[in-house]
Structure formats: structure tokens, C-alpha cells
Amino acid sequence: MTSAPSSAAAGLPPDFRFGTSTASYQIEGAAVEDGKGRSIWDTFTAQPGRIVDGSTGDVACDHYHRWREDVELLRRLGADGYRFSIAWPRIQPTGSGAVNEAGLAFYDRLVDALLGAGVQPMATLYHWDLLQALEDAGGWLNRDTALRFGDYAGVVAERLGDRVAHWCPVNEPNVVTMSGYALTELAPARGLLFGALPAAHHLLLGHGLAVQALRAHASGQVGTATNHMPVWPLADDEADTTAAGYLDLLWNRLFADPILLGRYPDAFLDAMPGPVADDLALISQPLDFYGLNYYNPMGVRAAPAGSPIPFEYADLTGFPTTGFGWPIVPSGLTDLLVDFRERYPGMPPIVITEGGCSFNDGPDEHGVVDDQARIDYLDAHVRAVADAVARGVDVRGYYCWSLMDNFEWAHGYTQRFGLVHVDFDTLVRTPKRSFDWYADLVRQHHAVRP
Ligand code: GCO
């Protein structure tokens, strides 16, 4: 049995929640089952060259059929909470109008099973799997998509609002905007550069409309799940520092300021479409928590003269890295949390709604997955949260990405983030040593509760 170092959670508040996160397209499979509509990820993964290993989420972890087994894993883990996402295409197969009862019933059963296992459900309403029918009408560039999203949120809230403990309306609106609409790494791969900015506004408007619907029909806490990174200049010179300031505005402030301050950074205000002032009143409705996904800091350098955008992503050096090549910088999380508290004094409590690492360890000859690197990553980052708490930041939870290995978007099944190993040929689940470590951590933390 792997015993967690008791100091890992030392200093965290007694009611601090430990959980894990997943997302519908990344784990469910059942891509065309029970009336589900076509999503932009069904389209994107069918296009040659989009996914590094040519795979799709058609089967993924087959969670749609194996959800009882996965809930049992969560019960064994002893997690306080489980963050999953609801596939809009299962609820409204055309993106509006008629509701698909089979889709709602799936999540109804899942929520009841989680509660039965003593796990608090945290539901994300949008984790990137937009209806293709809505994308064909402009997707998040079209204000109507935000309005449809608000309607969808109301449908889900009416059905699950009495039992879901925490809600995250939109997962990472910044990643959707930057990687899906400005660039072409993720679906729908529009490559619009600054032409993508209206999508940012409509994703945030969708967040606001969903908050309104949840407040009307649900009893749980409402928050966010935005990816935030400290942006570090590669060189300590004016050019790279200016580039870092610009990317910090674009990646972090453009999405946090509207929600937490009710305004856009001046540099972007004129780029936003529609009745922005009215929209910002919706977008900045009070929240019960601010969900923040942290993996690592981001390096940046100034772009060459004449480039369409004034910065270039750049790999940070001098740090250990994950199997994905991402730098491992726990102090970056502490700094980010302290910075948020200082920038947004009146902000609600923070929950780390995603944090984790990719290491591709598999079962050894004894069937043991010895992923010590993941244990070290999680230990260091839980301690980094405790450091931020010691410096006065109100952090209420840490949700490890991910419960199980799953479909890692454009990287297919080549990157493993799970506490549980999945054999994608047999779909057999094998809890890794990090699963046992995390279970011990949770048990030890529960033991200190009054
Ligand atoms: C994200 C997404 C997850 C990813 C995870 C690892 O943060 O990009 O929410 O779906 O799989 O972060 O990249």
C-alpha cells in the first residue's frame, strides 16, 4: 500500500475537497448511440491528419456503457467530488428544441450512482463537444449559439439541479477561442486569429446565460473552469516582456476580468460584438467558486516583425517535464493563486477544477502501474495549493485530471493523464500507484476533519 506523505495536504482547510475530472467526448464513446447528435469532435476526428495517432472518441473508455464500474472506482478512491461533463449532443441532438430523454436519463443515472457512492457530482455543461449543426450556423462566432446554450442549461438544470452539487458552465473558453477559433489545433479549427474574438465574447455570454438558468432551476454551487497559466517571457528583455504582457491579457485577463470585474481589458473592448455592457452584467453575475485549471506556466517570446500576432509560444527550459514535455513548476500554481487573489480582491473561493500530468507508464509483469512521477507531481502541486492557502488565498478543492486515461484531443491516446490505466484494446481499467496514493491522501485529509 502506498502511503501518502502526511505533509501533502497539511495546512489545507478541513473542508477542502479532493476530486477528479473527466469530459464526455474524452471518455464516453457511444458516439452515435441513443439519439446523440453529431458534434464538432465527431467531425474533426474523422478528418485525416487532425489527430496524431489517427484515433477518434468513437469508443474512448466506453464509459457510456461502463459507468457503473467507473463509479465504483470513484467509491474506492474515496474522492469528495467527481467532475464530469454533459454532452450537449446527447441532450439536444440538433442543438435546440426537442430533448433526447435517453441522453438525460444517462446523466440522471450517473448522478444518482455518484451520490450513492458518496461522491459529490460536479457537472460541466460544455467541454468542447458543440453540435455540428450549431457550428454550421457559425458556432461560437454566432450569438445565437450562446442563447441556445442558455436554453440547454435550463433543460439540464431542471432535470439534475436538485442533486448536482457544483456546476461549471463552460470548460476553458480561452482554449476553445485560441485553439479552436484563432488557430487550428482543436475543433472546429477555424484559424481566424483575431477574428476569433467574438467567439470569446459569446462563450462568456453563454456562461452568463447558463449561470442565470442554473440560479433559476438548480440548487448547487455555480462556478467556472477556465485554464489559467502564468505567462513568462523567455528572455528578460523588453520585447519578450511586452509579448508576455500581451499574451497574459489574451489568455488570462480577457476571460477572468469580465467574470470577476464585469469589464474587458481596454485593449479588447472594441473587438466585442453586440450589447456588450448588458452582456457583461450577465457574464459577471456572482459565483460560488472560481474554477481554475492549472498545469504549468507558459513561455513566450516576441514574434518576428511582420507576424500577424505579436507573440510566439516558447518552451520554458530548466525545469523537469512531464511525458507530454510540459514543464513541472508547482510554484507557478502558488504564484497564480496569490496573483488572482491580489488582482481580484472580492473574488469567490477558488477550486482547482483540473490539475495533473501525462506519463505513459503501463502495467508491469505483475500488473502494477508504478507511476511515481505522477505521485511526485500531485504531491508537489497539492503542497503548492497549501502554500497559497498559507498566504491567505481561499482555495477549496483540487480535482485531479484525470480519473482515467482518455482521449487527449489532437494527441489521441498517446498521452495518459489518468489515476487509472486504461488498456484501449480491452478497455480494462487498472488503478495505478497514484490512485492508491491519492486515496491515502484523501483518507488522511478526512481524518483531520472535525
Ligand atoms: C484541458 C482540458 C482537458 C485536457 C487536459 C489535458 O484543460 O485542456 O480541459 O480536456 O484533456 O487538460 O490536456
Image (cartoon, grey):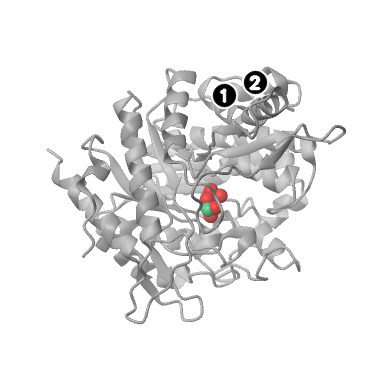
Q: Is residue 22 left or right of residue 44?
A: left
Expressed as whole percent of the image width and height from the top left, the position of residue 92 reads 59, 55
Question: Secondary structure beneath disc 1?
Answer: helix
Q: Is residue 448 left or right of residue 201?
A: left
Which class describes the residues within 10 Å of circle 2: few (<14), some (14-19), or many (20+)? some
Front residue of this view, candidates 121 and 91: 121
Q: Amino acid at mark 1?
A: Asp
Q: Amino acid at mark 2?
A: Pro
Q: 318 or 344, which is in the foreground?
A: 318
Q: Where 349 falls versus 123 (above or below)?
A: above
Q: Quadrant of residue 15?
A: top left
Q: Residue furthest front?
A: 318
Say the numbered circle drawn on residue 257: 1
Mark closest to the chain's N terminus, 1 or 2: 1
Res 39 visible: no
Using the image, determine if residue 303 lies above or below residue 264. Answer: below
Looking at the image, the residue that sits furthest to the left is 450
Q: Residue at point 38% right, 66% down?
A: 420
Horizontal side of 264 relative to 24 (left or right) equals right
Residue 63 coordinates in the image, percent (x, y)? 45, 68
From this view, report whether residue 393 is shown above or below residue 303: above
Can residue 33 be seen from the camera position used here? yes
Q: Position of residue 121 (x, y in %)?
A: 36, 50
Instruction: Give the residue at mark 2.
Output: 265
Q: Are marks 1 and 2 in contact (CB under 8 Å)?
A: yes
